């Protein structure tokens, strides 16, 4: 069957549908009268648009609500159970993957260690295996509407390809979309891991409803996701927030894996903590970390964070140095971007209140008074899942956008329509 | 007469009117069929909304256009001549002021030296005098619809008040709005000077149509205006882009007028160039600058820039140092914000291609490859007037916004309605 062209629906009609869906998905409207109020459309138009979306399976009747006088209004809801999204979040040393419903609720998930430097074929094949297993786990059900992936490096959002990612040898320009599109016959969106984390926090976490937010992830590497005017600011090439390879110390002799000296990531990231923590263990400076090594465990950023939580003075010093460097970078960002909220995520932030307090203190002492007047610096609470939930929202935002919605609406679901990303 | 409440117009109706006005003002639509195409509204709705806006004097018939087959379409235009805007741009040492039409075309303008440290009463009284003189100069005509002011320091946009501005003693919290609202009986909007410059470039200059832009002004002070997703990013308190008082050199002994050491502005701004240029003149290191002093002129940033253009080696060195520090800061910004265009304005940038080349080279050598793939670093061409034109657009954007338009539409013009800002 020849797909209907995008022109089959008038642009204003599409615009209405997108606004109705947004209002219901975001929870701002749950009845037809609320929709009329929130979207500013007339009640007749709302009724028609809702009917259209119900025919298409994109809205469903909710429970009948208590009347406040007249006829009891019938609730509306977005049928999150109508499809599934496959979502994955790759770190430098880990794979997180899940099957999500259409609202970012995770139906089954898996987390395992992985080495991103093994290259895209090995790593993505493993992700695909996990996807298959998770799909079996949740059992027969609705089709996969899309795939959303977060990668730990710069991604050109328009094409979904990594671009010269410093810690991902072999990934430069790899066609991640085609890889998953073929196997799961669904459209694929790919973004930087920190952008999907920021999106997860914006839609379902601590940043919900806010306009100006910075999400900073301090894992093996360091990166930031930005929200401007309530939406992700991706920048011209989609690499906004790529702060790990900014020079944090001029004249530093510490070589970064990107090839430059003194990068923030090389001095303050999880890999840097692991390097310095291991050295301290071998030199006998930290008995706690030496014991970790003796047990045969590797020392990574999380191990140093744990050591600090247990009161190990070397680890506390290392984390303090990291927190101050991160705080100095964030202070510049605060002066430049003026967010109302900074969310700190990633393994290193798990060192807990001590790390966060150091970051907060440095930010507040180095930023302009006006910019910090009501600034909050908070740990990301849904850290482990913000990326996965955000990836699901990335896919649904795209599928329900004014550009893409009309290309599949009225022809079933987006399942099988890998070309929708084009 | 009791003003009609905002509820007198249905929200969707207001939304339509705002979209029609935006499309015509931006030049994206100049006929009713084009409006239907651009806004996605049905032709009947377009015809009704256009009629409403014509009744209100916010749209006018343009010239009849050449037919492409059927009936010749009648052009539509925004009646820029229907009102006037008073606009002012304050620098640390200057006042720029103009009478503008509703599209930011300057009908009369004045530029003169002034010392912002004299405090708000003295400086704003002088601005008001100039406004009166310029109004006399353009002669009788339509009323003043609004006043737009750019100030050289942080401004809380929602209230129009300067907040702890480092170079403006006595201005902290001053009610700039009331000052002008009383005298000119019109609503007043106030913003940071660099934001209004960025807005001017975005609407009528080199940034027109772009999504991700950074405007950096290197005058006496240094500040930036940001564009994200095609709109000004003001940040949570409206102080985004305030980069002059970020530490550019750790451990520096150079004291900034803000009270801290090593600020970018204290090391690389026009006042810093003036300080170092004057020292060089007095020490006999620069015969060119010594001659300037001997002629009885003060050495400011512009004088050092001129000396560099004339080949003075001391001035060239000073500007090179400034350009490299600015470039280092911009490189961080490029990695963080990923703009497609950096516009460099302000008196120091007038040193010309040499300064810009140094800035560009530093930015390109210190930023990530993806972020600079298609980055342009360009001198602001309408520098002298971007702020004034931007201030007019700031006022009109507010007056024609969905929040404010319905509060005055149908009751004449916004002239006399100082309370519209509230």
Image (cartoon, coloured by chain):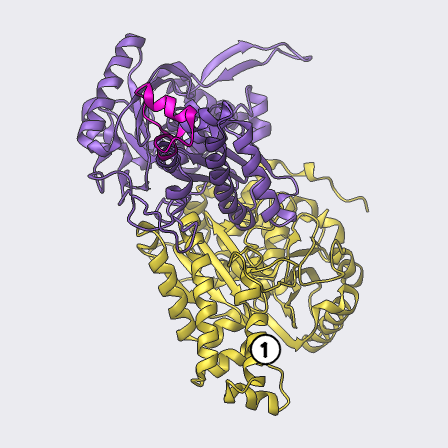
Chain colours: A purple, B yellow
Q: Can residue B202 be seen in this view?
A: yes
Q: In which quarter of the image is residue A418?
A: top left
Q: Which residue is drawn at 25% across and 29% down?
A: A115
Residue B335 position within the rendered picture, expressed as x and y whole percent measured from the top left: 40, 50
Q: Which of A277 and A116 is in front in this view?
A: A277
Residue B327 sits above or below residue A315 on the image: below
Q: Which residue is drawn at 55% across and 75% down?
A: B276
Residue range in magenta is A279-301
Instruction: Please indicate whether residue A187 sits to the left or right of residue A28 in the image.
Output: left
Tell me the residue that label 1 is attached to. Answer: B300
Q: Can residue A97 be seen in this view?
A: no
Q: Count the marks: how many?
A: 1
Residue occupying the far front of the picture: A284
Q: Quadrant of residue B174?
A: bottom right
Magenta run includes residue A282: yes
Residue A151 position within the rendered picture, expressed as x and y whole percent measured from the top left: 32, 34
Residue B294 position within the rendered picture, expressed as x and y whole percent measured from the top left: 61, 91
Q: Which residue is drawn at 19% across and 25% down?
A: A125
Q: Which of B190 and B247 is in front in this view?
A: B247
Residue A71 sits above or below residue A416 on the image: above
Q: Which chain does tag 1 point to? A: B
Magenta run includes residue A8: no
């Amino acid at each position: 069957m020849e797909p209907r062209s995008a022109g089959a629906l008038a642009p204003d009609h599409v615009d209405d549908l997108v606004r109705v869906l947004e209002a219901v998905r975001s929870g701002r409207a749950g009845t037809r009268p609320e929709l009329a109020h929130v979207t500013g459309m007339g009640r007749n138009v709302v009724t028609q648009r809702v009917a259209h979306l119900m025919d298409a399976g994109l809205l469903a009747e909710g429970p009948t609500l208590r009347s406040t006088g007249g006829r009891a209004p019938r609730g509306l809801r977005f049928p999150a159970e109508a499809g599934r999204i496959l979502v994955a979040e790759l770190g430098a040393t880990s794979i997180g993957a899940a099957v999500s419903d259409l609202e970012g609720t995770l139906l089954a998930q898996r987390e395992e260690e992985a080495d991103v430097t093994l290259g895209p074929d090995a790593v993505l094949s493993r992700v695909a295996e996990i996807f298959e297993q998770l799909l079996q786990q949740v059992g027969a059900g609705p089709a996969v509407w899309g795939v959303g992936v977060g990668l730990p490096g710069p991604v050109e959002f328009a094409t979904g390809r990594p671009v010269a990612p410093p810690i991902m040898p072999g990934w430069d320009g790899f066609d991640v979309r085609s890889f998953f599109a073929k196997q799961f016959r669904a459209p694929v969106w790919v973004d930087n891991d920190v952008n999907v984390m920021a999106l997860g926090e914006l839609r379902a976490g601590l940043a919900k409803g806010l306009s100006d937010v910075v999400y900073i992830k301090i894992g093996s590497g360091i990166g930031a996701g930005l929200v401007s005017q309530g939406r992700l600011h991706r920048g011209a090439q989609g690499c906004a927030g790529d702060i790990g390879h900014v020079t944090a110390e001029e004249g530093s002799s510490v070589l970064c894996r990107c090839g430059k000296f003194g990068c923030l990531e090389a001095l303050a990231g999880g890999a840097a903590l692991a390097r310095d923590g291991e050295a301290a263990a071998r030199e006998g400076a930290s008995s706690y970390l030496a014991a970790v090594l003796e047990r045969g465990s590797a020392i990574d950023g999380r191990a140093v964070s744990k050591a600090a939580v247990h009161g190990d003075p070397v680890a506390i010093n290392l984390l303090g140095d990291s927190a101050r460097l991160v705080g100095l970078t964030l202070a510049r960002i605060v002066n430049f971007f003026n967010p109302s909220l900074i969310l700190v995520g990633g393994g290193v932030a798990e060192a807990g209140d001590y790390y966060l307090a150091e970051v907060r203190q440095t930010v507040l002492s180095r930023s302009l008074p006006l910019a910090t007047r009501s600034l909050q610096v908070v740990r990301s609470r849904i850290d482990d899942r913000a990326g996965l939930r955000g990836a699901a929202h990335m896919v649904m935002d795209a599928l329900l956008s004014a550009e893409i919605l009309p290309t599949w609406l009225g022809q079933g679901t987006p399942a099988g329509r890998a070309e929708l990303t084009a």
